[in-house]
Amino acid sequence: MKKTKILFISYYFQPDNVIGALRATKLVKFLTRDFNCVCDVITVENETKKLKEREEVFAASILTIKEDKHKLQNNGSSQANKITTTMEKKQKPSKFRYVGFSIKHVIKQHQLLKRAKKQIKHIDFTKYDAVFSTFGPEFNHLLANFIKKKNNNLTWIADFRDPVYNLLYTPKLLSRYKKSFVRKYCKDANYITDVSTGYSKALYYKDSQKIRVITNGYDDDDFKQGEVTKFSKFTFFVSGNLYDGRRSISPVIRAVSELIESRTIAKNNLQFLYSGVIRRC
């Protein structure tokens, strides 16, 4: 039986020790091992992100785009400074800094795309049945869209493991760009995947027929190594970034407080563990 060939585009990939690497890495593993697929990967490497020797990689091949981070930072800063200087008097300092950072980030993504185009010229994309790109950053979808336009027979799956923007904490100056980004790449892609129905709604994309939910799960193999930590107390473990006042675990805290006050559970037998970053908006 013919194997399905899939090209994965993911800025983060094994052995990157970041949460963003897990989704693409695990999808490649299970598609290769359990679904008779052949998966190639395009990822990124720079001086602060050296890709070490990989153990048990299921990808048939991995192409690393060489990112000159220092050059991208300098070029991105000089272009962004010209744009953001005109906004300095109109914006509050905190919002101005956020907008300036975001503009630099977008410029870097397009510069990285330009570099990637040069490095993939030798690839015959007609041998693939599908290309799978996962957001973020934007680079993944930018490159997938470029490849799709040159090979229209390819099925492009645009994955959103993170929301592109949130109405609560995305400044209005950036909302227009982020909304247009979502609309364009959702429109151009054959299918759209995300991690939950809530994320599907957060895309604000009307063509729901294109959208499929692929929830995050777990890998049994990850539990075969190391010892399991046992706690004497009833333990809540929270991972991921929290945004002060907008994305928090306060509902859980309130519910637990009510249980303590009603003496349903004892305060001394509880503990909360948190791994992540608390961001101020």
Image: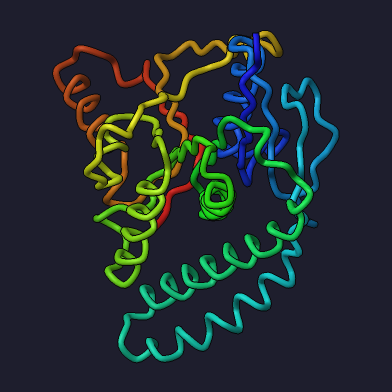
Q: Quadrant of the C terminus?
A: bottom left
Looking at the image, which residue sits at the far right? Answer: 53
Q: Residue at x 41, y 28 (%)?
A: 272
**Lateral position of residue 165 relative to residue 127, left or right:** left
Q: Residue at x 85, y 33 (%)?
A: 53
Q: Where's residue 10, x and y in %?
A: 61, 42
Q: Where's residue 207, x and y in %?
A: 25, 40
Question: Does residue 72 sit above or below 280 in this rendering?
Answer: below
Looking at the image, which residue sits at the far left? Answer: 262
- Give the color scheme: rainbow, by chain, secondary structure or one colour: rainbow
Q: Quadrant of the N terminus?
A: top right
Q: Where's residue 250, x and y in %?
A: 26, 38
Q: Nearer the viewer, residue 6 or 124?
A: 124
**Lateral position of residue 95 relative to residue 150, left or right:** left
Q: Residue at x 48, y 19 (%)?
A: 217
**Lateral position of residue 130 relative to residue 58, left or right:** left
Total of numbered circles in the picture? 0
Question: Does residue 250 sit above or below 221 in this rendering?
Answer: below
Q: Where's residue 27, x and y in %?
A: 57, 24
Q: Nearer the viewer, residue 20 or 113?
A: 113
Q: Residue at x 64, y 26 (%)?
A: 5
Q: Nearer the viewer, residue 48 or 229?
A: 48
Residue 86 sits in quarter? bottom left
